[in-house]
Image (spheres, grey):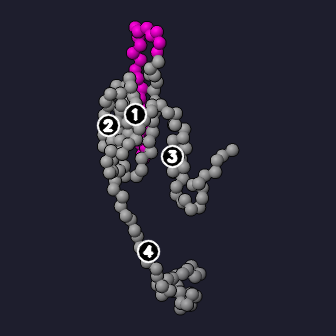
Amino acid sequence: MSRPSVFGSPLFLGFDHLEQMVDRLQKSADGYPPYNIEQVGESRLRISLAVAGFSMDDLQITQEDNQLVIRGRQKEDGEGRIFIHRGIASRQFQRAFVLAEGIDVEGAWLKDGLLHVDLRRPQPEVRVKTIPINGQQGRETMVSGAARPVVDGRASRD
């Protein structure tokens, strides 16, 4: 049984891509590796992922459209080593974050087992557009395939 979608409402025209992003995020929510998102300034964010055991060569960060994708794949270096217990995860991962329009990735660095990615969010613009309301005299309507001026709510016959 499919779940009802809030984006199926006629009030949300053109938002079907948001529903697809939400579905993708739900599928990738396995919890590994753990991460934090913190605000480090008025318009700056930082994502920190716990990637203990991964080197810079094992990690890849890409921006695909409006998604920030972080992938990790460790090389097997267990040759010649005998583990009595192996509790440190060495599995690959992919973690995706949906970015709002205009968010810029400033940079990334690896320190003390944490991968940090800095983001800058643009200052919000107040976008107000005034739509003019035309009176009866400026309006034309289509009558029999030809545009004719409207007079007193009726198309004139010329």
Q: What residue did someone put label 4 on?
A: 131
Q: Tell me the kind of residue under disc 1.
A: Leu
Q: Looking at the rendering, in which quadrant would you find the N terminus?
A: top right
User: In whole angstroms, how far apart are the C-alphas of marks 3 and 2?
Assistant: 24 Å
Image coordinates for residue 31, horizontal then vertical, percent: 50, 33
Q: Nearer the viewer, mark 3 or mark 2?
A: 2
Q: Quadrant of residue 47?
A: top left
Q: Nearer the viewer, mark 1 or mark 4?
A: 1
User: In whole angstroms, how far apart are the C-alphas of marks 1 and 4?
Assistant: 46 Å
Q: What residue did someone put label 1 on?
A: 49
Circle 1 SS class = strand
Mark positioned earlier in the residue sequence (1 or 3): 3
The residue stretch that appears in magenta: 63-86
Q: Which mark is residue 21?
A: 3
Q: Residues within 10 Å of mark 3 (few under 14, many from 20)?
A: some
- Determine if residue 40 is in view: yes
Q: Which mark is residue 108?
A: 2
88 w.r.t. 49: above or below: above
What residue lies at 38% left-to-right and 23% top-to-bottom?
A: 53
Mark positioned earlier in the residue sequence (1 or 2): 1
Q: Is residue 11 left or right of residue 133?
A: right
Mark positioned earlier in the residue sequence (1 or 4): 1
Q: Residues within 10 Å of mark 4 (few under 14, many from 20)?
A: few
